[in-house]
Amino acid sequence: MSSVSSRQDEIQKLLRSQGTVHIHDLAALFHASLDTIRRDLRQMEEDGYLRRIHGGAVLPNSAQESYAERAQELQPERTAIAQKAARELIPDDCVAFFDSGTTVCEVARNLKPSFRGTVITVNPMIAVELASHPNAEVIMLGGTLRKADLVVCGPTTLDQLRNFNADIALLGTCALHPEAGLSTSSTEERATKAAMIAQSAEVIAITTADKLETSLPHRVCDIDAISHLVTGRKLSNGYLANYTRRGLNVIQA
C-alpha cells in the first residue's frame, strides 16, 4: 500500500470517529506539508469520501440521515455540552430563544427544574421536550416545517420572532470559525439565527468540537456577536486562543 493510500485511509478513520478533520492537525500528524494534505482532501472529495470545508473536511452529507440518527451522533459530547450550558448559562427567570439542532434540544432536556422563564423555539422537539417541565413557559413559533431538520422557518417564523425581545439566544452551530464567523448551509436557517441574535441581549453558541474551525456558504454573524461558546472534547490551545482573543467566553464541558 502506498503512503498516499495509507494516509488517506487514516484520514477516513479520523473522520468517522471525529466528524471533522483540520488540515493543520493532519499535517502535524502525518509529518506532511499543507499542500500534500490539501491534495489528499481534494482527491478524497472527488472519490466521495468527504466534503471539503474551510480549513479541513467533514463527512459527506447523507440525505437519508434522519434527525433522530443525527441526535445519536457524538451523544456523550452533546450531553456534556447541554448539561454545562443548562446549569451555568441559563438563568432561572430568563426569556430565551432556543434555536434548532440536536444539541439545543439536549439543553432543553437538561433545563433545571427551578427554571421558570420562557423558552421561544423554532424546534417542535424542544416544545415537546419542555411540555413536561414543571415551570417553563413554552412558545412554539409557526412557519413552514422543514421535515428533515424538524424546524420551522420562513417569513411567518421571522415575523413572529421579531415580536419578542429575549435575554438569551441559544444557537445551534453548523460551523464556527474565528475569521469566517458563524455560518450555515441554508438561507432560511441563516435568517432565523440572525433574527434571534438581533432580538437578544446575549448570544450563546453551543457546538460539538467537530463544527469549530469550519465554515459554510451562508454567513450569519461575525464571531464578535457571540458572548459564550460551549463546546466539548479537548481542543488544542491554539484553537481556543483563536476564540478567546476575539472576546468569547469559551467553556469546555
Image (cartoon, helix red, strand yellow):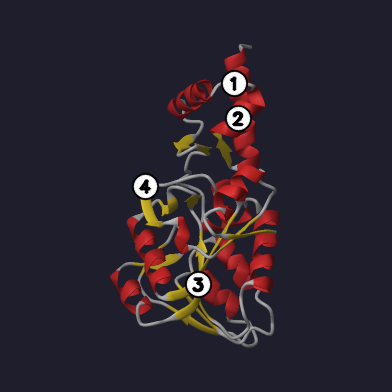
Q: How far is mark 4 from mark 1, CA to CA?
A: 28 Å
The mark nearer the N terminus, 3 or 4, is 3
| 53 relative to 135, above or below | above
Callouts 4 and 2 close, C-beta under 8 Å = no
Check disc 1 and give the amino acid type: Ala
Q: Which residue is mark 3?
A: 202
Which SS class for mark 3?
strand
The mark nearer the N terminus, 2 or 1, is 2
Q: How far is mark 2 from mark 3, CA to CA?
A: 35 Å
| 20 relative to 218, above or below | above
Check disc 4 and give the amino acid type: Pro
| Mark drawn on residue 32 | 1
| Mark drawn on residue 217 | 4
The x and y percentages for residue 32 are 59, 21
Callouts 3 and 4 close, C-beta under 8 Å = no
Name the mark nearer the viewer: 2 or 3: 3
Q: Is residue 225 visible?
A: yes
Q: Residues within 10 Å of mark 2 (few under 14, many from 20)?
A: many
Q: Residue at x 35, y 73 (%)?
A: 157
Q: How far is mark 3 from mark 4, CA to CA?
A: 24 Å
The mark nearer the N terminus, 3 or 1, is 1
Q: Residues within 10 Å of mark 4 (few under 14, many from 20)?
A: some
Which SS class for mark 2?
helix
Callouts 2 and 1 close, C-beta under 8 Å = yes
The x and y percentages for residue 68 are 57, 58
Q: Which residue is mark 2?
A: 26
